[in-house]
């Protein structure tokens, strides 16, 4: 009884903190009817934001907004395959261009001055402005899907009752890089307009033009660019992504943020000389892969969305890691960089082999193709054996650091690595069964999983700052955000104390979890792991309250529309893998989906008390296209798994019950 009262009071306190934070926030953006979001600019607003959008050969970070009601906008262009010297992790050619430095378009002889009235986002940054003299201009800014090109497509409409004269100058500016600073010599960055000259615009008429930003090797000729064609390709990618793996619920904000996160997760893939590589982005991380961002965070998600490039980039990343397997069991590098031609291992072993084994086994099961699984199996075996050899006298896995790479202490053995190893062993046992691996080896994996789970409790289990939770490493005496990892791996022995600690004022901030109690640093990846884990633990209401707050802040707040990396480091960059983690809060947290075979999964939908239904439609995993619907049925839930051809499962279940579904 005493514990129940204590937990209730903690919940009330945590929610009080949450709603106090929420009340202080403003929602600058709102949901738009076209499935996007919009910001209605007020009077003399002054606000700037930045959003990243990517394609196979380019990434663009557009800084946009208003200052005293006037437009401000510049774009940082990144060309991942135009490599600079030294050809390291950050050697993608980058260049920023401010619109105020471009030749001026004039209206009746006066410079075109924009007063934005509305900004919009749905995979394309749009804005509409009033122009002095009664005209209106609309912009659509986006990168090409498959060319090193960024486009600002504009339309000027005459809203007056008299003709106006528009003069578009010969806009052709260029920047030539120094030959000795490029792997392939000099690179040429250009901005050109597809129209120039004088135009008379009668009342009601519209003039279209486009600014084309590009980058290439100096010896390569620029081919013709059709702005409309590039726009259509971008819109096709957006629509296809929005229409696969569709989350439907009574909460429009969650549905919308899920749709946005899918796009950010799959657009940040680059066609390198080493094959397709999913990259974090953020102006720094391209044409390279990491054991955490790609293998652990993004790759297990891609099969559910069914994006061809996403799945291929996942397989390709594991191929690159597999290149570094060796008989001496020296660690695989944390990152393969420079289009696959080099590697980075500056933080030593961060638990990377546990990350790779975890991600590869989950991906192979959900992808559902035996030939691919057979290709990945030796890498999974090798990584598990590496981890086994790293198990110390306390029964947990030792490593040099963790995914934070020394930013915060991690000791000689951290909680994250051992939890990932535990889950990887379970997934490997499922995968090995599907592949017909000897039962003795599978039994060994299961035994090792039990042993590491027990060691996690005995070694890491502790009371920290008054909460029955986990220490992150030996000697750790303050709460850490990554105490959430056991929950995400379905280890619930200390779930109550851990959840109370996560949502306490010692860790929870207005931007989610602080990395460490008393710190102002936050990383969204830990917050997203925590929300997924709290759902998995069955604390649906608490998880939903905080997920709703987080989603509204990220989608409709001051910096939109995607999950971010960190702050103060990186200035809240829209790194891609964090968006994949957001999607997994829904698929693996709220829905509890776990692959257990090539055509089989377990799931435990957590329908919130205030909801009567939710659905996950057009799931593309397990070599199928299928949907799951859950509806309230008295005190139970009615669940249906189906597609156009057949119903795979139709049954009533209890709350927090776990079901299995075989897609045959």
Image (cartoon, helix red, strand yellow):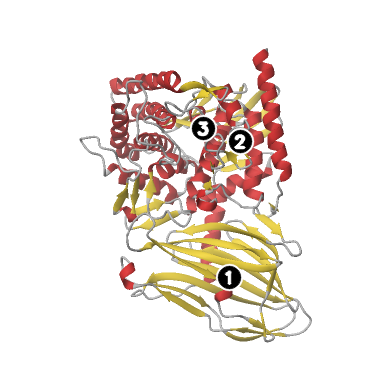
Density class for disc 2 (Cα within 10 Å; few <14, some 14-19, many ≥20) is: many
Q: Mark 1 and mark 3 in contact (Cβ < 8 Å)?
A: no
Question: N-terminal of the two: label 2 or label 1?
Answer: 1
Per the model, the C-alpha gap separating discs 3 and 1 is 46 Å
Can you say whether 550 is above or below 10 in the image? below
Quadrant assignment, res 377: top left
Residue 25 seen by the camera: yes
Q: Position of residue 549 (x, y in %)?
A: 66, 40
Q: Which residue is mark 1?
A: 153
State the residue in front, 210 or 342: 342
Per the model, the C-alpha gap separating discs 2 and 1 is 42 Å
Mark 2 element type: strand
Can you say whether 92 is above or below 97 in the image? above
Q: Which residue is mark 3?
A: 480
Question: N-terminal of the two: label 3 or label 2?
Answer: 3
* Label number found at residue 508: 2
Which residue is most to the top? 1
Residue located at (65% from left, 52% from top) = 558
Question: N-terminal of the two: label 3 or label 1?
Answer: 1
Q: Position of residue 248 (x, y in %)?
A: 63, 41
Position of 637 with respect to 307 (left or right) is right
Mark 1 element type: strand
Front: mark 3 or 1: 3
Residue located at (36% from left, 45% from top) = 315
Density class for disc 1 (Cα within 10 Å; few <14, some 14-19, many ≥20) is: many
Q: Position of residue 340 (x, y in %)?
A: 31, 53
Can you say whether 308 is above or below 489 in the image? below
């Amino acid at each position: 009884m005493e514990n129940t009262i204590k937990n209730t009071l903690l919940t009330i306190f945590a929610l009080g903190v949450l709603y106090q934070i929420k009340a202080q926030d403003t929602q600058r953006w709102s949901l738009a009817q076209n499935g996007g979001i919009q910001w209605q600019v007020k009077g003399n607003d002054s606000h700037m934001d930045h959003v990243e959008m990517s394609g196979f050969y380019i990434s663009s970070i557009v800084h946009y907004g208003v200052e005293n009601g006037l437009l401000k906008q510049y774009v940082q262009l990144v060309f991942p395959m135009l490599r600079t010297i030294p050809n390291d992790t950050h050697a993608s050619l980058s260049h920023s261009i401010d619109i105020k430095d471009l030749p001026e378009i004039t209206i009746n002889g006066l410079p075109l001055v924009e007063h934005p009235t509305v900004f919009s986002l749905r995979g394309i940054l749009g804005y509409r402005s009033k122009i002095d003299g009664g005209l209106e201009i609309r912009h659509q800014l986006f990168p090409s899907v498959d060319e090193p090109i960024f486009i600002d497509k504009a339309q000027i409409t005459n809203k007056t009752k008299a003709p106006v004269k528009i003069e578009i100058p010969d806009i052709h500016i260029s920047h030539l890089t120094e030959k000795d600073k490029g792997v392939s010599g000099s690179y040429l960055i250009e901005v050109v307009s597809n129209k120039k000259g004088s135009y008379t615009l009668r009342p009601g008429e519209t003039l279209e033009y486009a600014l084309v930003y590009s980058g290439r090797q100096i010896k390569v000729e620029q081919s013709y660019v059709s702005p409309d064609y590039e726009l259509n390709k971008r819109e096709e990618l957006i629509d296809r992504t929005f229409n696969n793996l569709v989350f439907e619920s009574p909460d429009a904000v969650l549905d919308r943020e899920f749709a946005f996160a899918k796009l950010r997760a799959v657009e940040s893939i680059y066609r390198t000389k080493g094959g397709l590589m999913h990259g974090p982005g953020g102006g720094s991380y391209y044409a390279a892969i990491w054991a955490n961002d790609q293998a652990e965070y993004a790759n297990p998600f891609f099969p559910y969305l069914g994006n061809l490039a996403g799945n291929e980039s996942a397989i390709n990343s594991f191929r690159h890691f597999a290149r570094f397997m060796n008989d001496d069991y020296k660690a695989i590098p944390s990152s393969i960089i420079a289009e696959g031609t080099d590697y980075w291992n500056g933080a030593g072993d961060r638990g990377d082999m546990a990350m790779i084994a975890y991600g590869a086994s989950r991906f192979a099961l959900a992808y559902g193709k035996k030939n691919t699984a057979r290709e990945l199996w030796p890498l999974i075996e090798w990584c598990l054996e590496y981890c086994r050899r790293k198990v110390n006298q306390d029964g947990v896995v030792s490593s040099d650091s963790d995914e934070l790479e020394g930013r915060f202490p991690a000791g000689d053995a951290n909680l994250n690595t051992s939890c990932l190893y535990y889950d990887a062993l379970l997934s490997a046992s499922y995968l090995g069964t599907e592949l017909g691996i000897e039962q003795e080896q599978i039994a060994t994996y299961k035994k090792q999983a039990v042993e590491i789970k027990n060691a996690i409790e005995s070694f890491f289990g502790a009371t920290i700052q008054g909460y029955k939770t986990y220490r992150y490493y030996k000697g750790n005496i303050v709460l850490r955000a990554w105490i959430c990892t056991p929950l995400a791996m379905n280890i619930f022995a200390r779930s109550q104390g851990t959840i109370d600690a996560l949502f306490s004022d010692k860790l929870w901030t207005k931007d989610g979890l602080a990395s460490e109690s008393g710190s102002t640093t936050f990383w969204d990846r830990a917050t997203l792991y925590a929300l997924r884990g709290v759902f998995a633990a069955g604390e649906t209401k608490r998880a939903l309250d905080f997920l709703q707050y987080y989603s509204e802040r990220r989608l409709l707040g001051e910096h939109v529309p995607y999950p971010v990396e960190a702050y103060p480091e990186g200035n809240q960059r829209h790194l891609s893998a964090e968006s994949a983690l957001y999607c997994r809060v829904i698929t693996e947290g709220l829905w509890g989906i776990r692959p257990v075979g090539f055509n089989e999964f377990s799931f435990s939908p957590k329908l919130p008390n205030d909801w009567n239904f939710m659905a996950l439609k057009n799931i593309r995993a397990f070599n199928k296209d299928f949907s799951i619907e859950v509806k309230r049925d008295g005190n139970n839930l009615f669940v249906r798994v189906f597609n156009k051809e057949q119903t795979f499962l139709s049954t009533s279940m209890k709350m927090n019950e776990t079901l299995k579904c075989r897609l045959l």
